[in-house]
Image (cartoon, rainbow, N blue to C red):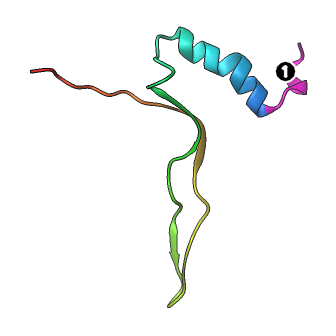
Amino acid sequence: MNKNDLSERNICAKFIAPAVGRSGRDTLSQVREEISFTKGRIIVHGKPVTRDKAKRADHILTYRFFTLY
């Protein structure tokens, strides 16, 4: 299999997602794929206000720490 012939999405599905799963992460609750994590920078030019392009990530890994009392 030549990695140069695969799309970015295929590489994520075939290589990155399995590696993240093998690392011990719970892929259902700790991994989010292909998401926007900001709404974009606010740009002010006098009266009209616009928003820049949103930032996107292929994978975001989360960790929630909580204590049971």
Q: Is residue 58 left or right of residue 28?
A: right
Q: Is residue 67 left or right of residue 40?
A: left
Name which residue lies at 50% across and 54% down: 38
Residue 66 percent across, percent down from the top left? 22, 25
Taking the magenta stretch, the answer to whether it contains residue 26 is no
Residue 43 percent across, percent down from the top left? 53, 74
Classify mark 1: helix, strand or loop: helix
Taking the magenta stretch, the answer to whether it contains residue 6 is yes
Name which residue lies at 63% across and 14% down: 18
Name which residue lies at 17% across and 22% down: 67
Q: Quadrant of the N terminus?
A: top right
Q: Is residue 30 left or right of residue 9?
A: left
Name which residue lies at 32% across and 28% down: 64
Residue topped by disc 1: 3
Q: Quadrant of residue 17?
A: top right
Residue 9 percent across, percent down from the top left? 75, 31
Q: What amino acid does circle 1 point to?
A: Lys
Range of magenta residues: 1-7
Residue 8 percent across, percent down from the top left? 77, 32
Q: Is residue 40 above or below residue 66?
A: below
Q: Quick one: 6 or 26, which is closer to the camera?
A: 26
